[in-house]
Image (cartoon, rainbow, N blue to C red):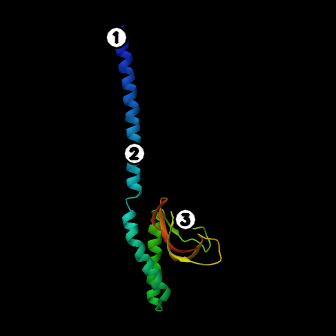
Amino acid sequence: MKNKKDYKRLKEKYKNMLIDFEKSKDREEKKFLSINKFSDEKFIKNIIPILDSLEITLKFSKEKSSINGIKITIKLIKSIFKNNNVIKIFPKKFDKFNPKYHHAIMSIKKNFESNLIFNVLQKGYIMFDRVVRPALVSVTI
């Protein structure tokens, strides 16, 4: 009788250890994928202000030779963003304010429903469903 009990106990213990191992393996795999997925986030955060500056420069530049170089650089940066699943957050006027994606830095008193985006002051960016930089907006109150 004792051998059967020991066998059942060891079998149950082995089964539980195997389940724990699988759970641990899954956790570590998810952790690895997350680290891998967001490893470029810091790099993207550092490039965003450069893209902002280039787009502003393009808007006000009058020299044809400069404009072509700026357009090519912007295109290359946007290509890097696309390859890293970086998506622009640029809400439309009167879209509902969402604190997950928007950062209100100004409030506008108008005869509109409250918590609507009135103006986008700076576009934001998302990388793999995670906000890298929220869009800076003014909202109605």
Which quadrant of the figure contains the C terminus? bottom right
Q: Nearer the viewer, residue 122 or 26?
A: 122
**Coordinates of residue 33 in the picture (x, y in percent):** 41, 51
Residue 38 is tagged as none
Which residue bears the numbered disc 2?
Answer: 29
Q: Report which quarter residue 98 is drawn in.
A: bottom right
**Residue drawn at the location 47% of the way across and 86% of the way down:** 67
Which residue bears the numbered disc 3?
Answer: 98
**Coordinates of residue 102 in the picture (x, y in percent):** 51, 68
Q: Distance between the residues labelled 3 and 2?
A: 32 Å
Q: How crowded is mark 1: few (under 14 residues within 10 Å), some or many (20 or more)?
A: few
Q: How far apart are marks 1 and 3 (CA)?
A: 64 Å
Which residue bears the numbered disc 1?
Answer: 3
**Residue drawn at the location 37% of the way across and 49% of the way down:** 32
Q: Residue extending furthest top?
A: 1
Q: Earlier in the sequence, mark 3 or mark 2?
A: 2
Q: Residues within 10 Å of mark 3 (few under 14, many from 20)?
A: some
The secondary element bearing badge 1 is classed as: helix
Foreground: disc 3 or disc 2:
3
The amino acid marked with disc number 2 is Glu
The amino acid marked with disc number 1 is Asn
**Residue drawn at the location 41% of the way across and 47% of the way down:** 30
**Residue drawn at the location 46% of the way across and 77% of the way down:** 74
Q: Is residue 106 left or right of residue 31?
A: right
Which quadrant of the figure contains the N terminus? top left
The number of discs equals 3
Q: Is residue 1 left or right of residue 52?
A: left
Q: Nearer the viewer, residue 9 or 115?
A: 115
Looking at the image, do the residues carrying marks 2 and 1 touch, with CB atoms under 8 Å apart?
A: no
Q: Distance between the residues labelled 2 and 1?
A: 38 Å
